[in-house]
Image: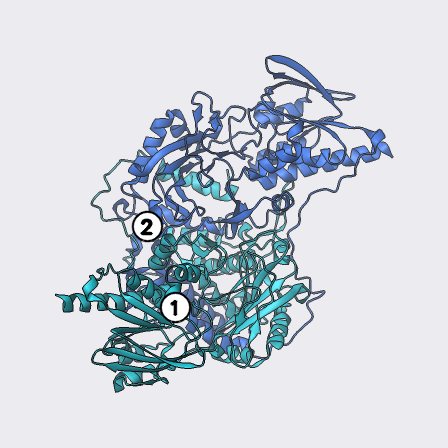
Chain colours: A cyan, B blue
Amino acid sequence: MANAPLSRRTFLHLVGAFGGSTAVYRAAVGMGLLESTHTARPDIAPLRTRDRKSVLILGAGISGLAAAYELSRKGYDVQVIEASHRAGGRNLTLRGGDLVDEAEFPQTCEFDRDPDLYFNAGPARIPGHHASLLEYCKELEIRLAPFINENRNAWVQDDAMFGGRPVRNREYIADSRGFVAELLAKTVRPDSFGAAFGNRDYQQLLEYLRQFGELDSRFKYVSSSRAGYATHDYTNPPAFKQPLNASELLRSGFIYLMSFSELDDQSAMMMEPVGGMDRIVTAFMAKVGHLVKLNSPVESIRLGAAGVDVRYRHAGNTLDAHADFCLTCIPMHLLGRIEHNFPKEYADALTAVPHGKLFKIGLQMKQRFWESEGIYGGISWTLQDIMQLWYPAHGIHRQKGVMLGAYTFSDEVAEKFARLPPAQRTALAIQQGEKIHPGYGRHVESSISIAWHRMNHMFGCPVQWSEPLQSQCFKTLQSPAGNHYLIGDQMSYHPGWQEGALHSAFRAIADIDQRVRASAA
Amino acid sequence: MANAPLSRRTFLHLVGAFGGSTAVYRAAVGMGLLESTHTARPDIAPLRTRDRKSVLILGAGISGLAAAYELSRKGYDVQVIEASHRAGGRNLTLRGGDLVDEAEFPQTCEFDRDPDLYFNAGPARIPGHHASLLEYCKELEIRLAPFINENRNAWVQDDAMFGGRPVRNREYIADSRGFVAELLAKTVRPDSFGAAFGNRDYQQLLEYLRQFGELDSRFKYVSSSRAGYATHDYTNPPAFKQPLNASELLRSGFIYLMSFSELDDQSAMMMEPVGGMDRIVTAFMAKVGHLVKLNSPVESIRLGAAGVDVRYRHAGNTLDAHADFCLTCIPMHLLGRIEHNFPKEYADALTAVPHGKLFKIGLQMKQRFWESEGIYGGISWTLQDIMQLWYPAHGIHRQKGVMLGAYTFSDEVAEKFARLPPAQRTALAIQQGEKIHPGYGRHVESSISIAWHRMNHMFGCPVQWSEPLQSQCFKTLQSPAGNHYLIGDQMSYHPGWQEGALHSAFRAIADIDQRVRASAA
């Protein structure tokens, strides 16, 4: 009952052709069709009392916290040393009263205190196949809700097309697909692909194009309900929109961005913790918070025969700590500048890998004006500096909401924003947002911006592995230097994602576990 | 920080090419770029006390309830007569203890009593452009959450491909797109489209195909992260999957179903009320429940000079009611069989339009087994009778969940299920579900099925307007017969959707309002 007539006809045809036949039951057992998503969380052995082992964890990012959680509950003596005033690393949710510890431009978030008014300044979404992170969410009882990347009601805006006028994502996608499908249907011939491609294949390809582009019976793209209606009051026949100018559509650089929600880690269904991504940090801290020392920047790391010695500052004092093992999720380029006695190859690798620049801005809006445009979540895209506008899919129909007003990770543009004082960043974001939502600026009540590459104790995000660097340095840094392990999303093939951070921690603690077992045996 | 490297490169390129230029601010005012979604809710005039008007509403479906709400708060005397034991019509959420009033096979739902264990047996999703329904959700303070139609981690299964083995939706889509894009990139030539299509257009088209199919630099589809990885432990280089056999992919009838989430009313972002679709019914009933008389089947409707006379049964008695106006959302084919004195053309039209058959089954599962497969919501598709499996995107990581185990609306297949007693329906649904999730059946704890075309007071769903019937009968039925108005989704160009039902009610009450104003003047 909830399918448009056009699709129903397709379905009915299909059901007649395929589904109506007597389906023979075949036992599925043994067909090997189950493709589970696995967690890599190691089952490390509990320490026997006489095998007392200590671990220092430098950095209370997600990898550090997970390592602390896993090791401490297996009997390891764990201490976490964190330079910042807070735990979580880049897992940072900003609420009213929170400090953004950016060098030069420290800010205090002035959002209203309200469960729906927060800004995930770091990671903001979890794909369904990030099994390790999801396993922690389950174990630590972190409530999850769907996160929306794609919204066909949202806007795409490009100064290069339609005079800068934004168009609905659904119109943009449906019309460009219709146009491309029509062009291609016109072009392909039964003999286009050689003898291996028979006439039946050809017919199927045409049919694929028709479905893909919503072409008519003569393979023309006339108009499409997928693009939305020009008028539709539901009690009169609807009027279709005229397709957008095809040449302009195809020429817009924008067309390439439309594959965003095809990406492995960005395609539906995505999730987010209810109340903010840092629910994960809070949950870990409820388990290991008593082991975490904040405001404690590390001054030196010395590998020795009997473990690792760490010197750090805390409350005006210089303190020393020693442990059998040390796990570090400090960003590698900062770690490289700390006093240490790492092997040369290891030390050189630490500073060889560049780090990117990333800027975001969160805006508390007086009204959820986007909802009156039929937008209840997802992303509007623009080729202006701000790149993306995100609308919260939580707190729907409440009066206020916090939206993302810029998300940019080209070095140049991120730096352009970062150089501006916060008020000017907001002004620029508003100026550009106005092209998508006229009157946008008057809804802005409060703003908070974050330049990750200027955040204290961070100064760069994310790590930018290239293939040459990866083959040159990754193995070096992934192997322990004595009893020191480098962890974090930086030491994964999935930088910028918490799942990568977790796997790096898993790898390190599995190795420690193995070494401890070997020495105990 | 939450984007895969591949896409980031694309972005960086784009930002360099477009976003870095100095964006000139242009006033957006007057550009006409705001395309709001409008509600059609009429602002009817409050009745003056001396203009006392009465309205009988036959049927407490969504259109009837909305009409009762709108009219009663403007001073009209409203009474709602509902044949069934409950209000809401097809807006039906089933929970433990609820009766499914199906002719021949009445069932009682035996789900656990739990806020997350419910089954939306009728409408289950709301698109962001269904502005009238959403306006009521806001006004009546119905909490909304995202609803997920598309999940690339879910399965597609077709006996005609891969020996019936299910494949991940992401693999199916990415590989079929890659294959089609490669085929087409091979085929198109700069001169394929005539002179109007220049070389730059050609290059853009190639680039579009590359992005669309994730082709390599030579426009070959080698493999794609979009399809998911064969192995990826995040701390070693990931291994791509081998693409699925292209010919088998394209030959599967399934490829046509992949346009489902392109549909106007099915594309992201979709929503659902938290706790069940019938929160809408409950909210309306909180306003107008005192005006609703349940268990009251109508026996006759007589149009007179002074209004409408209705005879109905209630608690063993025959009762008469009279009102100035009458709004009816009784399914038209049932209305046509009630004793009445409608004009012949109107009466003939009532029974001229066929009604479809629709079957759904809800399954309470002991474990949310789908979550261990990386599926947290959305739909798996099959060309078996059951057509769809839906996974709830609420109550994530709780122990149990209610999923949809069949959703079929071909007359033939819906009837096949409907003819079976409930236990056999469940057995058939399980048998087919096993092909997608081996071991499926052992998770089933309780089931509830619904054949809408066998539900008492309904006997068909949805109305099946054809274009000839629409031009022949729609206007007749849309115009009042005397003071009698036919409403409901059946009287909209959007049958099967609550938005259509609301608009039909709006149209009728706006007409009544106008007539009342005219007679008062």
Q: Amino acid at mark 1?
A: Val
Q: Residues within 10 Å of mark 2 (few under 14, many from 20)?
A: many
Q: Residues within 10 Å of mark 1 (few under 14, many from 20)?
A: many
Front one among A213 and B167:
B167
Res A493 → quadrant: bottom left
Instruction: Examine the rendered structure and indicate whether residue B276 appears above or below residue B180.
Output: above
Res B320 → quadrant: top right
Q: Where residue B175 appears, x then y in whole percent?
A: 34, 58
Tell me the distance, in whole angstroms, between the alpha carbons under discs 1 and 2: 32 Å
Q: Seen in the image, is A242 located left or right of residue A43?
A: right
Residue positioned most to the top: B317
Depth check, mark 1 against mark 2: the one in front is: 1
Report if residue A202 is visible in the image.
Answer: no
Q: Seen in the image, is A248 located left or right of residue B514?
A: left
Q: Where residue A469 appears, x then y in whole percent?
A: 31, 80
**Residue drawn at (55%, 72%), measured in percent from left and top?**
A449
Count the marks.
2
**Residue drawn at (53%, 39%), measured in percent from left and top?**
B277
Q: Amino acid at mark 2?
A: Ser
Q: Where residue B219 appears, x then y in whole percent?
A: 36, 68
| Residue B372, numbered label | 2
**Residue drawn at (33%, 82%), measured in percent from left and top?**
A350
Residue assigned mark 1: A292
Which element type, helix, strand or loop, lies under badge 1?
strand
The chain containing the residue under callout 2 comes to B
Q: Where residue B495 appears, x then y in whole percent?
A: 56, 38
Query: Do tags 1 and 2 sit on the same chain?
Result: no
Q: Quadrant of the C terminus of chain A?
A: bottom left
Front one among A226 and B509:
B509
Instruction: Examine the rendered structure and indicate whether residue A70 appears above or below residue A395.
Output: below
Residue positioned most to the right: B521
